[in-house]
Image: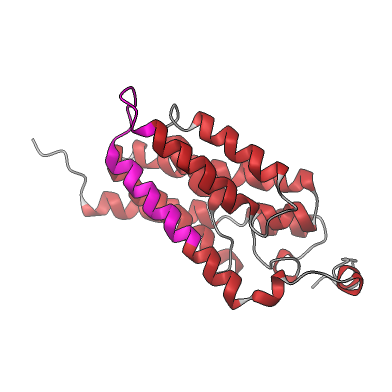
Amino acid sequence: MDTTPTFTVFLVAAFIAYILGALPSAYTVSRLNGVNIFEVGSHQAGATNVWREVSRKMGMVVTAVDFTKGVMAIVVGYLIGLENAELLVPAAAAVAGHWNSPFTKFKGGDGVATLVGCAAGLAPIEFFLPLLLGATISIGFNKKFDHPTLWAGMAGYGLFIVLSFLPSSRTEPEIVYGLTGIGFAIMLHSIYFHKRHRHYFAPRTVDDENDHTVTPDNVS
């Protein structure tokens, strides 16, 4: 008996995952704190920008929510009949939703935390240590890099690849290759945004710092 999921199953999984990824956690949390995240810092709706422009506490909240979105995308895929490498479809859709959220006029962030959540859902055992490594780098080097979550993701994912190809690993090679492809796409997305909006990442002067101070009068 053929148990291959139908196109409709893939489509439903991708749609639900896209909506999950598009949930505007960074924008919502920032607005609740009086900040329009698309007008400060890197102008991206991601945990790093919230961490820097709102507060560390709120940045961690956004990280947790975005991570959960990725996990839930995989869980939904499981529940509607996908398995193993087939779950890369909702994983990619969740990241795409984070990039282009219809709730924020198709603006978003890089989607690193969301991909991490997807990877944790796909390979929870192999991804535990890489998750700890990535979290350490992201928090410890937040002010030293323009994209600390990106570097943290690359370091953590490098360790994940090594662990995934150990003889004791239960993770299918196709999953590793697929996640690598999505991670590479995120890196290109980040590089493109950085080059296109280079002025967002220029070193700040004292006047710049004052200009970014958000009050009820200058929040739109």
Indicate whether 219 appears above or below 83: below
Residue sitting at x 51%, y 48%: 154
Whether residue 175 appears in magenta in the rendering, the answer is: yes
Residue sitting at x 52%, y 63%: 99
Report if residue 113 is visible in the image.
Answer: yes
Residue sitting at x 43%, y 30%: 126
* Residue 208 placement (x, y as % from top left): 86, 73
Indicate whether 219 appears above or below 160: below
Residue furthest toward the top? 168
Whether residue 118 appears in magenta in the rendering, the answer is: no
Characterize the magenta stretch by its predominant secondary structure: helix
* Residue 114 placement (x, y as % from top left): 52, 48
Q: Quadrant of residue 33?
A: bottom right
* Residue 46 placement (x, y as % from top left): 64, 56
Task: Describe residue 75's horizontal placement relative to residue 47 as left or right.
Answer: left
> 203 and 78: which one is in front?
203
Can you say which quadrant of the picture contains the C terminus?
bottom right
Indicate whether 89 appears above or below 27: above
Indicate whether 92 appears above or below 138: below
Can you say which quadrant of the picture contains the N terminus?
top left
Task: Describe residue 115's horizontal placement relative to residue 172 as left or right.
Answer: right
Task: Describe residue 100's horizontal placement relative to residue 135 as left or right.
Answer: left
Q: Which residues are magenta?
A: 164-187
* Residue 90 placement (x, y as % from top left): 38, 49
Residue sitting at x 79%, y 62%: 35
